[in-house]
Image: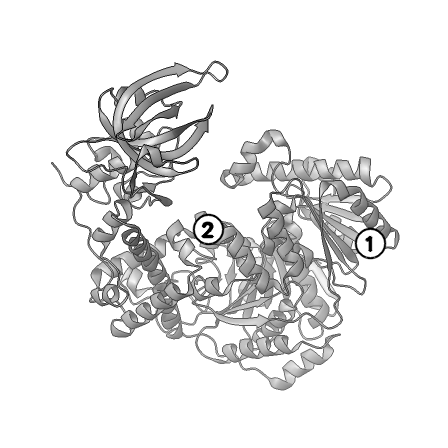
C-alpha cells in the first residue's frame, strides 16, 4: 500500500468514503496533517475495570460482561430510538441504555462479551449505564475502554470513536515525519520527538504520556513564536533608519505650550521614544497606556521632532472618527510649531497649513502634496496603505490600535507606506524586518536592499496586554508604558445593572442629563432577539456586510426604544457603520441623514444629550462633558473592551458613571463583570480577562492562526521562558539556521501562518 504523508488529502486514504470526508471537512480537517493535529480536547480515564455490584450513582466506570439481551424501541413522546441491553458479570447484572443510536443494536450481539465505559444513572430506582462507549472483547486489546480514552471536538455523525479509529488507520501507513526541533532542544526540555508525541497524544497509555505529548506540541509553537520575535529583533537591528536629531530646547518649548504637565510615565515614555529616534537603527516600540493616559501627546511630540528634521510621518488609525480626533489634537496643541498636517480618509482629504488655515483638497492634489513632501504629517485610515500613496521621505510610522484593523488590512500593513527615497523597485513595509530565512536572499522583507533606509515604527495601544502575552505575541517590540492618568481625574463609579433595576438607572441618567451632562449608550454588534440565537453563536463567522446590517438594526432598535419609551423628552442621536463618514461623502439617499462626523460634532458641542452607538466609541472618542457610559448586553463584551468603553467618560471635571446593563448573565459571566469593579488598572483587568476567556478568545484564534494547544500555553510562564531560552541558544549558534534545514523550512511556514497584531 502506498505510504501516506502529512500533505496527503483525506480522499487519498483508501478506507475513507466521501461522506466521512465531508464530515471531517466540517471540523476544518482536509489533510492528513489536519487530522493528526486535531488533538483531543480532554481524556476520560477508564483504567480500572469495576464490578457491577460496586457501581454507584454518578460513577464514571468501565465494566466488562456478557450481553444477555439487547433490543430497541421508540420513545412515544420524542420519537427517539432507544437501545437497551442487559449485561452481566459474576456479581450481577444491569442495563445499558443508548438514546438515538439505533446502530448499536447491530453492533452488539446477545451472548457476546464486551467492555462498557460510561456514567451510572438512575431511572425508576434502577441503576443503568447511560450512552456508554463499548468495545467487543477479543484477543486484541480493547482500544476505547479500559484505558485512557481521548475525547475530540466532534461534529454531527462523527464521534470521538470514529475519529480515533481513522487516526489509527492513518498511522498504519504513515511515512515517518521529519523532526524539526534540534536534538539538544528536545533533550534539554525532556520532550519526545514528533512521531512519538503524535502517537502518545492520540493513544496514550497513561495520563503522563498524554501530558508530555501535549507539552511538546505547545512548546514547539512557543519556540517558533519566540524564534520569530528574536529573529525580527536581530534582523531589525541590522537595518538603517534615519537618525533624528532631537533638539532639547525645541522639545521643552513644545511641552511649555501644553495646557497641562506631562505625567512622570508620559515623560519617561517620551524620553524612550526620542532616544530610539536618535539611533540609526529602526525603532520598533509599543506605547501602551490606559484610555485617556495621553499616548497621543507623546506620539505627537515625536512626530513633530521627526517632521522638523525634514522627514514625513504617517499616523494610521482604524476609524475615521479616531483619525479626525488625532488630526484635531495635532492642530490644537502643535499649530504654532508647523503646518503641513494632512488628513486622508477614503473619500476626503484636508490639509492644515498653519496660522489657522485649513482647507479641503482633491485627493489627487493631496497625493501630489505628499509626494512633494509639502505635507509633513499625514493622519489617515487604511487609505494610507493604498498603492497610489507615495511619500517623499518617510521617517516615522505610527499605528494606533493596530489590532482593530481587519485581517486583510493588517496584512497590508506589511506592504504599504511607500517612500520615494527609501525604496527601490518594491514597497517599504510599515513594519520592516529582514527575511533571509524566508526568502533566502540578502534583501529585506520590504524589498529594500540591505543598507537602505527604513522608517521608525511606533505602535500605540490602549488595550491592556497581560504579561505572558507580552512575552510571546509582542516579544519583538520594545515596550513603553504610561501607567498614570492626568492629575485631577476622578475615579468612575461603575455599577452592574440587572433587568429589575433598569428603570432606576434610566431615572439616574435623566437626572444627570438635566444637570447638563451627556451619555453614551453602547449596543453589541449582534442581535438581541432570542430568535437569532444561531446568529449570536456564529457571529464571528458572518461577513463584514452581514455584521454591518446587524449593527445598524441593533442601534436603530435601541434608538427607537430610548426615543419613544425611555427618554422621549431628551435629544437622542445614533451612530453606526452605515452612515456616511462626513458631509462631503454623502451620496444619494444617504444625504437625507447626518454623517458620522456631523453626529459626533453635534455630540461634542452639547447639541445631543444621548448618543446611541456601537463599539465605534471604544477607541479615541473624547467628549469631556460626557459623564455617563451605559453598555447594553455587557456580558457579551470582553473585560478589556468594557474597560475602554468606561474610559470614554471621566475626562472632565464632573463625576462620571458607568452602567453595565445585563440581560440574563450566567453566574460565571456575572463574576467576570464584577472584576471590572475591583481591578486597580487596565493591566490587572487584562490578566483577569485572560483567565476568564482564555487566550484563544482573548487574542482571536482565527486571526492569529495559532492552534488551541499553543493558545493555552500562553498562560504558562515557565514553558514560555524555556521556549525563549531554546530559541536564543539556537540563533546564537546558527543565526540563519543554515545547519538546521528542517527547522528553517518549518519556520518559514510558521511565519506565513501566524499573524498577530
- Would residue 719 be found to the left or right of residue 378 on screen? left
Image quadrant where residue 46 sits: top left
| Label 2 Cα neighbours within 10 Å, binned few <14 / some 14-19 / many ≥20 | many
Tag 2 or tag 1, which sits nearer the N-term? Answer: 1
Residue at the (39%, 70%) spot, across then down: 233
Q: How is the image coloured?
A: one colour
In the rendering, at what x and y percent does residue 110 appear? Answer: 25, 19
Residue 310 appears in view: yes
Image quarter of the N terminus: top left
User: Which residue shows up at 29% across the image and 72% down it?
Assistant: 729
Instruction: Judge the density around disc 1: few (<14), some (14-19), many (≥20) Cα neighbours within 10 Å.
Output: some
Give SS at disc 1.
Answer: loop
Q: Is residue 222 above or below residue 265?
A: above
Residue labelled with disc 2: 696
Q: Nearer the viewer, residue 370 or 177?
A: 177
Residue that label 1 marks? 606
Q: Residue at x 72, y 67 (%)?
A: 332
Left or right of 489? Residue 751 is left
Residue 462 shows up from this direction: no
Separation of disc 1 and disc 2 at Cα?
Answer: 41 Å
Q: Position of residue 285 (x, y in %)?
A: 50, 70
Residue 743 appears at what percent x and percent y? 25, 60
Q: Which residue extends farthest bottom?
A: 249
Amino acid at each position: 500500500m502506498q505510504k501516506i504523508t502529512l500533505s496527503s488529502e483525506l480522499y487519498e486514504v483508501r478506507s475513507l468514503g466521501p461522506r466521512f470526508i465531508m464530515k471531517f471537512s466540517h471540523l476544518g480537517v482536509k489533510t492528513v496533517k489536519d487530522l493528526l493535529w486535531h488533538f483531543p480536547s480532554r481524556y476520560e480515564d477508564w483504567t480500572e475495570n469495576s464490578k457491577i455490584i460496586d457501581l454507584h450513582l454518578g460513577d464514571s466506570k468501565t465494566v466488562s460482561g456478557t450481553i444477555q439481551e439487547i433490543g430497541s424501541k421508540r420513545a412515544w413522546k420524542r420519537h427517539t430510538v432507544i437501545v437497551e441491553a442487559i449485561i452481566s458479570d459474576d456479581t450481577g447484572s444491569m442495563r445499558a441504555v443508548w438514546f438515538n443510536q439505533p446502530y448499536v443494536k447491530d453492533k452488539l450481539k446477545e451472548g457476546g462479551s464486551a467492555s462498557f465505559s460510561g456514567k451510572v444513572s438512575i431511572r425508576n430506582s434502577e441503576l443503568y449505564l447511560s450512552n456508554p462507549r463499548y468495545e467487543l472483547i477479543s484477543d486484541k486489546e480493547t482500544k476505547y475502554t479500559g484505558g485512557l480514552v481521548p475525547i475530540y471536538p466532534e461534529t454531527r455523525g462523527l464521534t470521538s470513536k470514529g475519529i480515533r479509529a481513522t487516526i489509527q488507520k492513518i498511522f498504519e501507513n504513515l511515512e515517518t515525519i521529519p523532526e524539526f526541533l534540534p536534538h539538544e532542544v528536545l533533550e534539554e526540555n525532556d520532550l519526545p520527538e514528533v512521531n512519538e508525541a503524535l502517537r502518545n497524544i492520540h493513544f496514550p497509555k497513561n495520563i503522563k504520556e498524554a501530558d508530555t505529548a501535549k507539552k511538546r506540541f505547545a512548546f514547539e509553537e512557543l519556540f517558533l513564536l519566540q524564534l520569530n520575535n528574536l529573529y525580527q529583533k536581530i534582523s531589525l537591528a541590522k537595518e538603517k533608519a534615519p537618525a533624528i536629531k532631537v533638539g532639547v530646547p525645541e522639545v521643552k518649548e513644545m511641552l511649555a505650550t501644553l495646557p497641562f504637565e506631562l505625567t512622570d510615565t508620559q515623560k519617561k515614555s517620551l524620553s524612550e521614544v526620542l532616544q530610539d529616534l536618535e539611533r540609526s537603527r529602526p525603532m520598533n516600540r509599543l506605547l501602551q497606556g490606559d484610555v485617556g493616559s495621553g499616548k497621543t501627546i507623546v506620539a505627537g511630540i515625536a512626530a513633530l521632532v521627526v517632521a522638523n528634521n525634514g522627514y514625513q510621518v504617517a499616523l494610521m488609525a482604524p476609524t475615521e472618527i479616531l483619525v479626525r480626533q488625532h488630526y484635531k489634537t495635532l492642530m490644537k496643541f502643535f499649530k504654532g510649531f508647523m503646518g503641513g498636517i494632512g488628513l486622508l480618509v477614503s473619500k476626503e482629504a484636508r490639509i492644515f497649513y498653519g496660522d489657522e488655515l485649513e482647507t479641503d483638497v482633491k485627493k489627487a492634489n493631496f497625493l501630489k502634496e505628499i509626494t512633494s513632501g509639502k505635507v509633513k504629517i499625514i493622519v489617515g485610515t487604511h487609505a494610507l496603505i493604498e498603492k497610489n500613496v507615495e511619500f517623499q521621505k518617510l521617517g516615522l510610522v505610527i499605528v494606533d490600535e493596530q489590532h482593530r484593523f481587519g485581517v486583510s488590512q493588517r496584512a497590508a500593513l506589511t506592504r504599504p507606506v511607500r517612500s520615494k527615497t527609501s525604496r527601490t523597485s518594491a514597497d517599504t513595509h510599515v513594519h520592516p524586518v529582514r527575511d533571509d530565512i524566508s526568502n533566502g536572499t540578502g534583501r529585506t522583507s520590504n524589498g529594500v536592499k540591505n543598507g537602505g533606509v527604513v522608517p521608525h515604527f511606533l505602535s500605540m495601544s490602549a488595550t491592556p496586554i497581560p504579561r505572558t502575552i507580552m512575552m510571546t505575541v509582542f516579544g519583538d517590540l520594545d515596550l513603553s508604558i504610561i501607567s498614570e492618568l492626568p492629575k485631577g481625574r476622578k475615579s468612575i463609579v461603575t455599577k452592574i445593572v440587572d433587568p429589575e433595576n433598569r428603570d432606576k438607572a434610566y431615572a439616574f441618567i435623566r437626572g444627570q442629563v438635566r444637570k447638563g451632562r451627556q451619555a453614551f449608550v453602547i449596543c453589541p454588534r449582534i442581535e438581541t432577539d432570542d430568535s437569532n440565537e444561531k446568529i449570536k453563536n456564529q457571529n464571528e463567522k458572518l461577513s463584514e456586510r452581514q455584521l454591518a446590517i446587524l449593527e445598524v438594526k441593533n442601534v436603530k432598535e435601541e434608538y427607537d426604544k430610548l426615543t419613544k419609551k425611555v427618554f422621549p423628552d431628551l435629544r437622542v442621536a445614533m451612530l453606526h457603520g452605515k452612515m456616511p463618514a462626513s458631509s462631503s461623502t454623502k451620496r444619494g439617499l444617504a444625504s437625507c441623514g447626518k454623517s458620522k462626523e456631523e453626529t459626533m460634532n453635534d455630540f461634542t458641542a452639547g447639541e445631543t444629550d444621548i448618543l446611541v452607538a456601537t463599539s465605534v466609541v471604544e477607541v479615541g472618542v473624547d467628549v469631556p462633558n460626557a459623564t455617563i457610559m451605559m453598555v447594553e448586553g455587557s456580558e457579551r463584551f470582553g473585560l478589556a473592551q468594557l474597560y475602554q468603553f468606561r474610559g470614554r467618560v471621566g475626562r472632565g471635571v464632573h463625576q462620571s458613571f458607568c452602567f453595565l446593563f445585563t440581560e440574563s448573565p450566567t453566574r460565571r459571566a456575572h463574576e467576570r463583570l464584577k472584576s471590572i469593579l475591583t481591578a486597580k488598572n487596565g493591566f490587572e483587568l487584562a490578566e483577569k480577562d485572560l483567565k476568564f476567556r482564555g487566550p484563544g478568545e482573548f487574542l482571536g484564534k482565527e486571526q492569529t492562526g495559532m492552534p488551541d494547544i499553543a493558545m493555552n500555553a500562553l498562560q504558562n510562564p515557565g514553558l514560555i521562558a524555556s521556549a525563549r531560552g531554546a530559541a536564543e541558544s539556537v540563533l546564537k549558534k546558527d543565526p540563519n539556521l543554515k545547519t538546521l534545514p528542517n527547522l528553517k523550512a518549518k519556520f518559514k511556514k510558521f511565519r506565513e501562518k501566524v499573524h498577530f497584531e
